[in-house]
Image: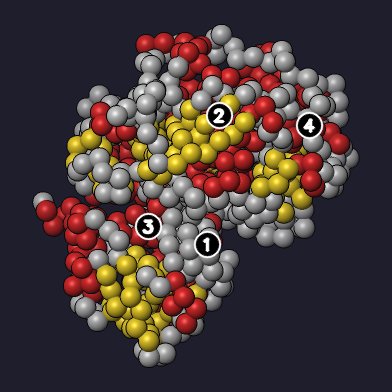
Amino acid sequence: MGQTLTEKIIANHLVVGEMVKGQEIGIRIDQTLTQDSTGTMAYLQFEAMEVPRVKTKKSLAYIDHNMLQEGPENMDDHRYIQSVTKKHGVYFSKPGNGICHQVQIERFGVPGDTLVGSDSHTPTGGGIGMLAIGAGGLDVAVAMAGDPYYIIMPKVVQVELTGKLRTGVSSKDVILEVLRQCTVKGGVNKVFEYTGPGVKTLTVPERATITNMGAELGATTSIFPSDEMTEKFLKAQGRQGDFKVFSADADAVYDEIVKVDLSTLEPLTACPHSPDKVVKVSEIEGMPVNQVAIGSCTNSSWLDLMKVAKIMKGKTIAENVSFVIAPGSKQVLTMLAENGALADLLNAGARILECGCGPCIGMGQAPCTDAVSLRTFNRNFFGRSGTPSADVYLLSPETAAVSALAGVLTNPLGKVELSDIEMPNEFLLNDTMVMEPAPEGTEVEVIKGPNIKPFPETKPLQKEVAGKALIVVEDNITTDHIMPSNAKLLPYRSNIPYLSNYCLTPCDAEFPQRAIDNGGGFIVGGSNYGQGSSREHAALAPVYLGIKGVAVKSFARIHKNNLINNGILPLEFVNEADYDTIALNDELAIEDALSAVKAGEAKLINKTKGLTYTMKIEVSERQKEMLIAGGLINLIKSKK
Ligand code: MIC
Ligand code: SF4
């Protein structure tokens, strides 16, 4: 029986376990990446492991999220990351060099290799045939130390692409269509593997848009084969040597199939406030628009911005629109500057931001009250733009550009002519913003500014775990709810005590104080709890507030791992209807938590209601040890 591409790469990297779907396996990691807003914690944790040098083939640290620098905190973080990476053998990409995923695919990704990154959009690397997975900072620190990265052996979904996209329809519409079909919780513990004759019609940046936003499915990752298109891209990046063909066997067997006919696809948009609330642009066309934002790791490639520049050339944006562009990398921006496309954008009225995440993570460019904001980004979770009353629609660069000109949401189909925009044979190569680590490192001093506080300490699991239901939240709570990020909070990513004052406040402003007043307790939630970002802060802030268990209908993959890594019990209702019987401040308890963890099942007693709920603790033997030790760092220390 033939193998899928996913299975082939896993087989090449398997170090622990067997490739049995649903079971935990450990894989060898070739590359790691961090970005600044998760990176400070990851490097503090790496330092705590006392491993002198990273053991991967290549590890990289990017500065791309926290770049507003309103106070010293951001640059203090940059300095810390620059010095700690130099010491321990990690390459450092300076602020301004670009968004981690964009630069990684341009300059460093290798087909067939594995990559773990402390950012949920690490699967962008699947666009060149890498098995690229997003994880919490601690898991990345462990991978840097040379230990395996653990995943549940995934099911593999075949996404069969047929036909060819029409001009005006883009790869963004492909992933929006997959999200429409599969939803934000449809991908947990699955890899989405793209196959079929449509694959060869998509360039690497187009593929990367799709694999990037596969994160919104909750998937472990998404991947395209490495083929002639990949070779062309790597050659144009001066990296022909990194090319190798990788694809699934013709008789590979998949667990599920999703079909997308590129020829009949139409421009789509994800409506507020979820990436899977997808409708055809034509269905809501004509809606007045206040802001159009182009960029983010999903759609900020040279190809994307060239298309936008072509559409804007010689025209001016509508009076009612603020039009902002954050190019994905220095390579992209410099090439646009050199070929004149940047001038076309500026002439049309574009506000050009530096190369980074910017408005995608609420670092500036918050839209006006009650705004309609059209964004080429990948997430439109409630409040993420920095304006809680704003409605954010996710869509393609083509749709964004024609709408910026018209001032109303506009369907680009039949309105744009882009046939002369093709991938360049040579990209502009200049890696001077990537610093090499010191050859030895022992002499390098690590600089920690005053905002860099130690990560919270966790305690071994107690026999009885008891406390109140400190909050009860609904389905699809995102990490943007649990640990909001915006221009005011992102500078404090190295300061958990400060951040914890904002934990879950978009759901309930009183939650942090209630948690402190009660000496901790439980969080109760619905399904897909913790979707979105990989930020470990969504576990670390609850640790700081004394949260002992999170009882939900189901978890998103990365967040569940982050809870376990930090010693918080992940509890899932066996009978989902039990969720409805828990109210705020109900007294909850697990009488013998140690036995419950070992058995993989707990009896959660609701003392207030006189009810007992059966909860799954679906974790591996390795994770049981972690929960009992009170988290991974404690476990590592106890084994030294
Ligand atoms: C995001 O897009 O939500 C982020 C900000 O990039 C996060 C990482 C973070 O919270 O720092 C992610 O995707 O993991
Ligand atoms: Fe940055 Fe946005 Fe991409 Fe996250 S999704 S890495 S914030 S550009």
Task: Give the Cα distance between marks 2 and 4.
Answer: 22 Å
Q: Earlier in the sequence, mark 1 or mark 3?
A: 1
Separation (CA) of disc 3 from disc 4: 40 Å
Three-letter code for the amino acid on which mark 2 is drawn: Leu
Asked where in the image residue 83 lies, by quadrant, the reply is top left
Residue on which disc 1 sits? 477
Which residue is label 4 attached to?
Answer: 412
Decide if ligand 2 comes within 8 Å of the CB at mark 4: no
Q: CA distance from mark 4 to mark 1?
A: 33 Å
Q: Secondary structure at mark 3?
A: helix
Amino acid on which disc 1 is placed:
Ile
Whichever of labels 2 and 4 marks the residue nearer the N terminus, that label is 2
Task: Locate residue 333 relative to residue 640 in the image: left or right.
Answer: right
Residue at 56% over, 73% down: 508
Quarter occupied by residue 90: top left
Residue 23 location (% of width, % of height): 26, 49
Viewer-side label of 3, 4: 4
- Residue, disc 3: 560
Residue 103 position, x and y percent, is 49, 27
At x 50%, y 53%, the residue is 185
Q: Is residue 570 above or below residue 192?
A: below
Q: Which residue extends farthest left?
A: 640
Camera-near label (2 vs 4) is 2
